[in-house]
Amino acid sequence: MHSRSFKAAVVITLALWFALASFAATLSTRHEARSYHRIKENANTERRMTASRHSRAARSRAEQRAESARTTRRVAVRRHGRAHVAHAAYERFTASSYTTDAASGDQTAGEDPIVRQAALDALGNMNGTVVAIDPSNGRILTMVNQKLALSSGAQPCSTIKVSVALAALSEHIVTKDTPVDLGGWKIDMNQALAHSNNQYFEALGRRLGFQKVSYYAHQFGLGELAGWNIAGEHLGEYPSQELPASLGGVGKMCSFGESVSMTPLQLGALMASIANGGTLYYLQHPRSAAEVAGFSPKVKRYLDIAPLIPEVSVGMLGATQYGTARRLRANFTSEQVLGKTGTCSTAGTRFGWFGSFANSQYGRIVTVVFLEGDRAFSGPKAAELAGHFYRNLDEHNYFAGKSSPVHSASLLK
């Protein structure tokens, strides 16, 4: 019996390997000659980024050693029977999901009061942050729990799949409708984004390779400061080297954001560039009514993604319609919302991410919900809170209250 099970496992493994090898061999890339150099910031920003990287380097190495040790223990446990595997899989969370003073100390004089109140009501007493952005100019409309929003960031979990999808589309590896064989079953980008399929994005990551994955991640703002002179903003981290193969390699980086640290502002800036057709703005957080009156957008760079936005939009809409973010619709159905969830945990803390934008004819608003806590939090929970936020705005006629319809580039095709 054991012999037949072992042979079956070998056959399945070989079939999966050959399927992925065939996928890698048949898909093409048109930009092999591209120079994948790192994006340059201005001198002052580069100095701040360098100082932040040095402060994070020691912690990053320690975290990799800890994860390697955990992997070794999991492998050892698997060799000693299923009963122990179930015990080892139990995750003990030490972080609290609730707080009484999340917004304490926030600077709010330059924020939109309607947007801020909607965010406060949606977040309630949960330990998290809500960042809302006008994608047409990069203005932060509100930032609830600024201490967390401007912190050093966290693993992006499955929200990293958005940048990987754009990278794969840019390199013409797939279209949104290309079926990818994952060993006996196939899936396309529409379904993979909607349902957050890890195997699909691992396959794309291996096909792209670390150099290209890193290049596009930096193009989209990871590993860089997202804000323009925002006091207290910390830097996320995009590693300069591929994750070791023992920890999943580039596939794990592309499916789960392993070894990457992303801030809510960085995810917000990326979502804003998708919502506005490809302009990556520096995010600005006005601190007074005078700064709001004199607000001037600052472009970080123009991204060559306009033709790709309809490609990723189908899956991002699918996430809220029937996928991992469908809990949003329990609270809000008045406008289309496109987004991506993310759920993962480390060192006793679970993260719940949701980056999105409401696609109203009167204008779009980008929202990032990021939660830190115990097993009560997840990407779907963050999407549920985003639904509360959008509903709160709708009840205050935020969308219909705009002066005239906005003619934006088509999202879906």
Image: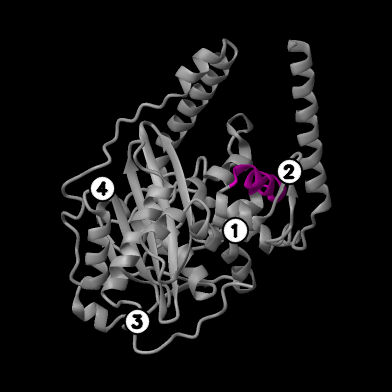
Sort mark 4 into few (<14), some (14-19) or many (20+) by Cα contacts within 10 Å: some
Q: Nearer the viewer, mark 4 or mark 2?
A: 2
**Identity of the amino acid at label 1?**
Tyr
Q: Quadrant of residue 146?
A: bottom left
Q: Main secondary structure of the magenta part?
A: helix
Question: Compared to 208, does 65 lie above or below?
Answer: above
Viewed as shown, does residue 408 lie left or right of 244?
left
Q: Is residue 13 magenta?
A: no
Residue at image x 42%, y 49%? 380
Q: Which residue is mark 4?
A: 126
Q: What's the CA distance linking mark 3 and mark 4? A: 29 Å
Which residue is depicted at the point 38% across and 31% down?
A: 347
Residue linked to disc 2: 185
* Image quarter hosting the N terminus: top right
Residue 164 coordinates in the image, percent (x, y): 60, 54
Residue range of the region highlighted in magenta in the rendering: 197-210
For disc 1, the marked residue is 216
C-alpha gap between disc 4 and disc 2:
39 Å
Q: Considering only order in the chain, which callout, 4 or 1, is on the residue closer to the N terminus?
A: 4
Measured in 3D between alpha carbons, the distance from the residue under mark 2 to the one under mark 1, in whole angstroms, is: 29 Å
Q: CA distance from mark 2 to mark 3?
A: 44 Å
Residue denoted by label 3: 400
